[in-house]
Image (tube, rainbow, N blue to C red):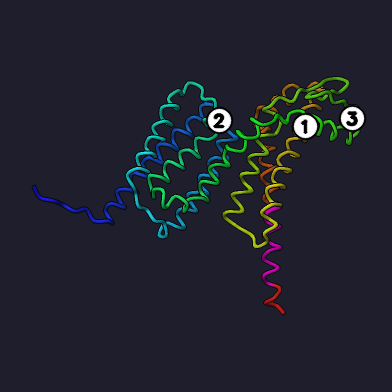
């Protein structure tokens, strides 16, 4: 019997090939589940986050330490096996369930273990943080509280401020000629968590020098997501009051609901660009003196 040795560079290439293959498979399963469930909003945000993560890894591709270890690899493969077992039902995936919301983060943890073991796990903390914010906050917040009543009160305030004769009763927004009930899906939780995740992603990819921004940016993201959705609920209440069922369906479940999500993202984007511009100007001031 003749012993053969495999060069380290070949091992790394083989590892990269299998990592790419496994990652492609896991992402395909996740995207397919979102597609089959018609969850367009979460599909779009997930794609944006995946592109950001891919960009971050590509920029650091020569600095990554890929040293696979036996125990972490086995653990990572077991986790992936669990994901595959629990994602076999594609009839109508419940993508708002904790499993699908945490699927990207769990998959990222397993891939990190396979790629670099326990020792190199921390080098992927930025990417794992972004993966967690794809769905983790919505799982945590929804398990702790229901913000439907808060949203109803805020939308009632907006309508009152605009001059409408409106009353709030719990999760109901009551107008003289119609009313709407704010369910959990319309409470703005999705919008809030999307903008919060976007805030975290921006801070990790384009950090500013001021430490206070680490606290301000997520809070502003939460507020923007909540306020924009509050206007959406107020609009739907007006449409019900004026007997516009087609328009209501458009803004409730149609493309109109995505438009409000885009508005929230654009408002936050403008806010973060303003912070970055201020940060840039402060760095240029000493040079001009």
Q: Which residue is at the far left?
A: 1
Residue at the image point whose x is 51% and y is 46% from the top: 128
Specify start and end residues of the magenta stretch as a single range: 271-284
Which picture quadrant has residue 187? Answer: top right
Where does the image place residue 170, in percent across and percent down from the top left?
80, 24
Residue at the image point whose x is 73% and y is 28% from the top: 148
The answer to whether residue 270 of the structure is visible from this angle is: no
**Relative height, residue 193 to residue 69 (above, below):** above
Secondary structure of residue under mark 3: loop
Instruction: Provide the residue designation for mark 3.
Output: 164
Q: Quadrant of the C terminus?
A: bottom right
2 or 1: tag closer to the N-terminus: 2
Where does the image place residue 122, in percent across and percent down from the top left?
47, 52
**Relative height, residue 246 to residue 269 (above, below):** above
Instruction: Provide the residue designation for mark 1.
Output: 150
- Looking at this view, is 17 or 210 the one in front? 210
Measure the alpha-carbon separation of dots 2 and 3. Answer: 39 Å
Where does the image place residue 282, in percent across and percent down from the top left?
70, 68
Measure the alpha-carbon separation of dots 3 and 1. Answer: 19 Å
Instruction: Provide the residue designation for mark 2.
Output: 98
Q: Which residue is at the far bottom?
A: 289
2 or 3: tag closer to the N-terminus: 2
Answer with left or right where residue 176 lies relative to residue 194: right
- Looking at this view, is 231 or 244 the one in front? 231
């Amino acid at each position: 019997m003749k012993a053969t040795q495999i060069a380290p560079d070949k091992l790394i290439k083989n590892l990269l090939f299998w990592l790419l293959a496994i990652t492609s498979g896991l992402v395909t399963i996740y995207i397919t589940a979102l597609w089959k469930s018609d969850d367009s909003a979460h599909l779009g945000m997930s794609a944006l986050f995946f592109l950001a993560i891919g960009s971050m890894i590509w920029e650091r591709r020569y600095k990554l330490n890929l040293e696979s270890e036996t125990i972490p690899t086995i653990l990572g493969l077991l986790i992936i096996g669990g994901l595959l077992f629990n994602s076999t039902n594609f009839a109508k995936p419940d993508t708002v369930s904790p499993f699908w919301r945490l699927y990207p983060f769990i998959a990222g943890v397993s891939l990190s273990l396979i790629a670099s073991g326990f020792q190199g796990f921390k080098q992927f903390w930025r990417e794992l943080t972004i993966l967690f914010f794809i769905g983790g906050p919505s799982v945590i917040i929804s398990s702790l509280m229901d913000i439907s009543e808060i949203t109803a009160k805020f939308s009632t305030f907006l309508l009152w401020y605009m001059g409408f004769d409106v009353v709030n009763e719990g999760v109901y927004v009551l107008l003289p000629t119609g009313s709407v009930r704010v369910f959990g899906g319309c409470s703005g939780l999705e919008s809030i968590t999307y903008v919060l995740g976007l805030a975290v992603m921006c801070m990790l990819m384009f950090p500013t020098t001021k430490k206070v921004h680490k606290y301000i940016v997520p809070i502003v993201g939460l507020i923007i997501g909540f306020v924009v959705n509050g206007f959406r609920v107020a609009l739907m209440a007006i449409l019900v009051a004026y007997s516009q069922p087609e328009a209501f369906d458009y803004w409730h479940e149609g493309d109109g609901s995505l438009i409000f999500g885009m508005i929230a993202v654009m408002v936050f984007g403008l806010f973060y660009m303003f912070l970055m511009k201020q940060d840039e100007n402060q760095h240029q001031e000493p040079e001009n003196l």
